[in-house]
Image (cartoon, grey):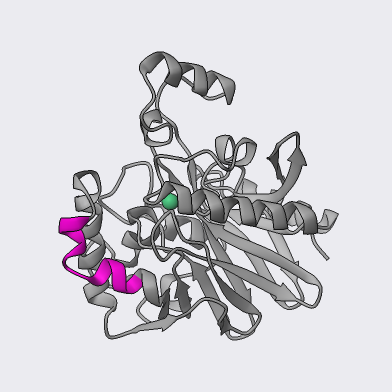
Amino acid sequence: MGFTRRDFGLSAAAGLAAAAVPGWASARINLGNKRIETVSDGYLTLPPEFLFDGLEPDALQQALKQYGLPAGPLTPEVNVTLLREEGRVVLFDAGAGPGFQDSAGNLTGALEVLGVTPDQVTHVVFTHCHPDHLWGVLDDFDDLLFPGAAYLMGQGEWEYWFDPKTADSIGSSRTAMAIGARRRMEQLEDKVQLFRDGEEILPGVAAHATPGHTPGHMSFEVRDGSNSVLVLGDAVGNHHVSFADPGRPVGADQEPQTAAAARMRLLDRLAAEQMQLIGYHLPGGGIGRAERIGSGYRFVPAV
Ligand SMILES: [Zn+2]
């Protein structure tokens, strides 16, 4: 159950081997026959306003200080979850791919360190359609990077971003995101398998609707008996304000109030059940737990 000393030893050894890949980080969880770890796609470079929307400069600096963040750009990790078991190699999200940010798009290199090649991937499961999660499905030549994979996405998320009208209605700050998503999705159209909230999408993997960050955002509960881990995607998108003050609206969320409600529900459950979690942008590879502290929570990394 959970982490063992042996697991930490193994991931430390893998970490040494991966030293040449910048930003690579991994911890490991064994759930029955399922082996789950995270592989680094790199990191993002974001202006602080991206999170702390609408604050005056002084208030922004104060907020950054309050959460122990640098005054300059935020550089959150990008952690793709890899699940391996007999007959299946599953990725949760596909990374940013080429052409989004120079500091991201390293997934192929990180997988290689674990001995996984793109043609071995059997399933790519999406939390949502933002660039750092979706754009990595295409390689440098705009071909599908994982040619043998089935692609799984929540129906609502697919319908929202595949609709050509979304680019006009989403608002100017997100137009490029919508156009970019649609372009990648056109290549997935013949292959994608859509699912709904509550469905078991693969053996031992259930989808949970966690809307708000995007309209159809999904998280995934991977379970073996009484042990489980929640793959959060961006439903809890950072280790600072979204844990300490989960009800506070965050600029990165498309529907901030809906996202805050989903986040509070998730953290309440994660802390109460002391369930393992994986966050796409959480530090140290993103694996850990949530612990209640004061009126909020804190992220407790596994490594
Ligand atoms: Zn993201």
Task: Judge by depth and name the residue closer to the eye, 201 or 3.
Answer: 201
By secondary structure, the bulk of the magenta-drawn segment is best described as helix
The residue sitting at the top extreme is 58
Image height check: is 18 above or below 210?
A: above
Q: Residue at x 75, y 44 (%)?
A: 291
How many marks the image carries: the answer is 0
Image height check: is 191 above or below 56?
A: below
Magenta-highlighted residues? 158-169
Residue 271 image point, x, y percent: 75, 51
Residue 11 falls inside the magenta stretch: no
Residue 224 seen in render: yes
On the rendered structure, is 24 left or right of 152?
Answer: right
Locate the C terminus and report the quarter of the image it occupies.
Answer: top right
Residue 168 falls inside the magenta stretch: yes
Task: Judge by depth and name the residue closer to the eye, 217 or 98.
Answer: 217
Residue 162 image point, x, y percent: 25, 71
Locate the N terminus and report the quarter of the image it occupies.
Answer: bottom right
